[in-house]
Image (spheres, rainbow, N blue to C red):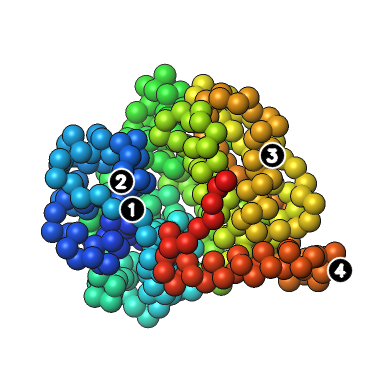
Amino acid sequence: MINDRTILHVDCNAFFASVECLLDPRLDESPMAVCGDPASRHGIILAKNEKAKKFGVVTAETIWQAKRKCPQIVLVPPTRGAYDKYSRLCNEIYLQFTDCVEQFSIDESYLDVTGSLHLFGDGRVIADAIRRTVREELGLTVSVGVSFNKTFAKLGSDYKKPNATTVITRENYKEIVWPLPVTALMFVGKKTSDILTMFNIKTIGSLAQFDRETLIRRLGQLGGQIHDHANGLDGSSVASFYDEEKPKSIGNGETFEYDVTDWEDLKTRVLALCESVGWRLRRQNLKCRCLQVSIKDPKFQTINRQKMLERPTNLTRDIYQAALELIQANWSSGKPIRLVTITASKLGEADTVVSQISLFSDTSERKQEAIQNAVDRVREKYGRKSIGFGSG
């Protein structure tokens, strides 16, 4: 007899839009969306409420496309600090049911509640309790998938929205999962999907029943992995919320909604990425000794370049300067760019690093760290957009 785990995937519904409506309830009276730059036709939709969804507005489309579908749509910029706050509050609720909570993204978490069944009831009961608690305490809705592995739990949370629980078992997974498009599986992107279509594999079920060795020959290890996942063979565990394993690198990337050729435009975008990387380093009390920049052009040709830094840092200023130097040295001026990723690596504990380099740190460096820490405190209190650095 198989002793299955009970795993939940909890997904906050229209998270950014829902938080904005909590901050300003008037927004929910009409179709609304959170977008990158409301003043730009080229900005993209990051999240939308249910009223906008009924007009066919979808995430990742451009603002002008959304306005064409729904001229009366209300557009607002993201309030970053608020999203972090509500994400933390959601996870605090999940921790009331288990300590095996693995945050997957700002609005998604996996929970292994196997050890909590005797306290709270079965997976569906726990999922419904979480949905009810989140709604009553935070005013948000979540959808929850319940299954015996992480892959099917995530498919379950996507299966019915908003504010729903879907249970996928060994007895019903072929009925629920197999008719879904193969692109619903994690790791099946457009390129992989195009290859699968060559074999007439369009659903998860057709993938599950296809010859595994043929997939491995065509797709390598990925072919075997997605075949296993389609058949419910996913043994990956849910990490404990209290695991303190430090990352080996911290990065952030952006795929631009249009080809960027203007240097000032590019600098602004790179600064935003560097601010994100620097903030995440400081939040985890880390400094980096190496910086890498990845650049992709519209034809998907990619270069990766890295450099060792003069001294370990987690300052946005230093990361930004190093990133610009790498781009200028390795990319022709005016050549279009579609994607940029900034990655900090060779990480070490900030406190340890500081003690090692304190004899060589000048007053200016210490002042910059004090300024950066002050900026972080303002942002934590008033939101990520409340204060920033110039890109000049």
Q: Percent from the top left, x then y, of residue 292?
A: 67, 42
Q: Position of residue 284 (x, y in %)?
A: 61, 66
The total of numbered circles placed on residues is 4
Query: Which residue was labeled with disc 4?
Result: 359
**Looking at numbered disc 1 in the image, what kind of residue is underneath it?**
Pro
Which secondary structure, mark 4? helix
Q: For mark 2, does the 10 Å Cα neighbourhood hold few (<14), some (14 to 19), or many (20 or more) residues?
A: some
Residue type for callout 3:
Glu
- Outermost residue, bottom side: 119
Label 3 neighbourhood size at 10 Å, few (<14), some (14-19), many (20+)?
Answer: few
Q: Which residue is mark 2?
A: 38
> Of 167 and 337, which appears nearest the observer?
337
Question: Real-space Cα distance between discs 4 and 1?
Answer: 44 Å
Depth check, front residue: 286 or 375 = 375
The residue carrying mark 1 is 77
**Residue sitting at 51 percent across and 28 percent down?**
261
Q: CA distance from mark 3 to mark 1?
A: 30 Å
**Residue 330 falls in image quadrant:** top right
Q: Secondary structure at mark 1?
A: loop
Q: CA distance from mark 2 to mark 4?
A: 48 Å
Q: Which residue is disc 3 drawn over?
A: 325
Callout 2: helix, strand or loop? loop
- Whole-number angstrom distance, CA of label 4 to CA of label 3: 27 Å
Of label 3 and label 2, which has the lower sequence position? Answer: 2
